[in-house]
Amino acid sequence: MFYMKELPNEEDFRPLVPEYSSLDTSSVMLFYLFLQVGSDMLTAFETYLANHGVSQGRFIVLLLLLRSQMRNNGSGLSPSELAGQAGVTRATMTGLMKGLQRDGLIERFSHDGDRRKVIVRLTPKGKESLHAIFPDYYSRIADLMNDLEDDERERLSRLLHKVKNKMNLSKQALASGARG
Amino acid sequence: MFYMKELPNEEDFRPLVPEYSSLDTSSVMLFYLFLQVGSDMLTAFETYLANHGVSQGRFIVLLLLLRSQMRNNGSGLSPSELAGQAGVTRATMTGLMKGLQRDGLIERFSHDGDRRKVIVRLTPKGKESLHAIFPDYYSRIADLMNDLEDDERERLSRLLHKVKNKMNLSKQALASGARG
DNA sequence: CCCATATAATTAGGCCCCATAGCATTTTGT
DNA sequence: ACAAAATGCTATGGGGCCTAATTATATGGG
């Protein structure tokens, strides 16, 4: 998690500006501000979820399962699909599921047609967990965004999409670079 | 790290809306979009830093030390201060410093007046590490924000501050709640 | 001066998330 | 039939983070 309680200010960058031609102070300050707000949000909700007995990672798995269930009537998802949708490796997903199954929130069934495959589904307890979390969870999110008028939300959303697109374009460039 | 490759769309929320009075679809979608962009950014830069041999956590420690050094002429910081500024416990900071010292990026000296205290400083190698990272690092950030005009940056910054303030206000409310 | 208390740093032990590599099983495509 | 691909899993290890306990030192009141 990114954290730096006191973000650098313009003065902190001033001595660096002559040294680094690539340094655009306003970009960096915006970047840091963004990361800080995002981290704070993430941390706050992580803590909140932890109080309900689930981690962010597990919560996302539960959300994905619920969504799949609502979209196509409880057919369930395979670990492989879950890993893909959650952006983690299959091995990581195995670990997440292990915990979720131990806690009785998901079940694993073997696929009829393909014996390599496993089908993962929410248990009633898993569903209840989510429904226990949701009311308060949604209310906190609504509260957080409450200060933003409709047009501000619109604008923020557009700006976020702009950054997102930019990042998708230069994703490989971003992550690579530097001698490994 | 938050991750959900395909964010929920309006339709995914539709069946939930009648069930949860607190659910404000536009808030939640904005919230998720924000977290996704933030996570992607964080992950990309984490990968980038990893290619340079430092983790996010360590990088922040190095930044804090550099800043302190530039602000008041190399007096250094104590582990306690570092932990406070980085938002982690002292124990966690000890672990981070252990790695940094092993790699020769920082040094620990004992405080003259108070023998409980330790003073942490960047080594020349630590400083070099940062200076090796900076040019490319700043250039990537500048590139990322390049699509945003000056007025867009202004607006984004204002919106981010708005969310940040809101969060600071309701921080305790946010993180708490739920039977622990 | 002495002791209780506070503070600083560390260690020990543990949890979660995550990755890579390797493996067994099963399917698929030629 | 057989090589290649896919699936899920285990083993191993790293990073980050925490709490609790330990050690050393400082401080302030009695």
Image: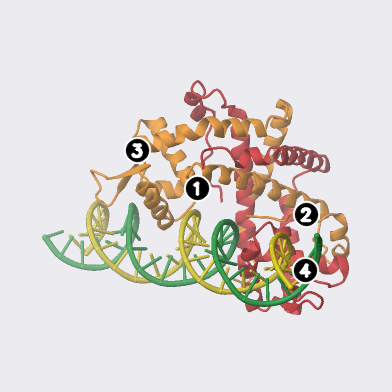
Chain colours: A red, B orange, C green, D yellow
Chain label for disc 3? B
Viewer-proximal residue among B124 and D13: D13
Q: Determine whether label 4 and label 2 are within 8 Å by CB.
A: no
Is residue D10 found left or right of A168 in the rendered image?
left
Q: Residue A57: x, y in percent? A: 65, 62
Vertical order, B102 against A9 (above or below): below
| 3D distance between C-alphas at marks 1 and 3 | 18 Å
Give amino acid for label 2: Glu
Disc ID at residue A37: none
Q: Residue at x 72, y 56 (%)?
A: B4
Pointer 1 residue = B55
**Camera-nearest label, 4 or 1:** 4
Secondary structure of the residue carrying numbered label 1: loop
Disc ID at residue A77: 4
Q: Residue at x 78, y 76 (%)?
A: A111
Pointer 3 residue = B123
Mark 4 on the same chain as mark 2: no
| 3D distance between C-alphas at marks 4 and 1 | 33 Å
Q: Tag 3 or tag 1, which sits nearer the N-term?
A: 1
| 3D distance between C-alphas at marks 3 and 4 | 51 Å
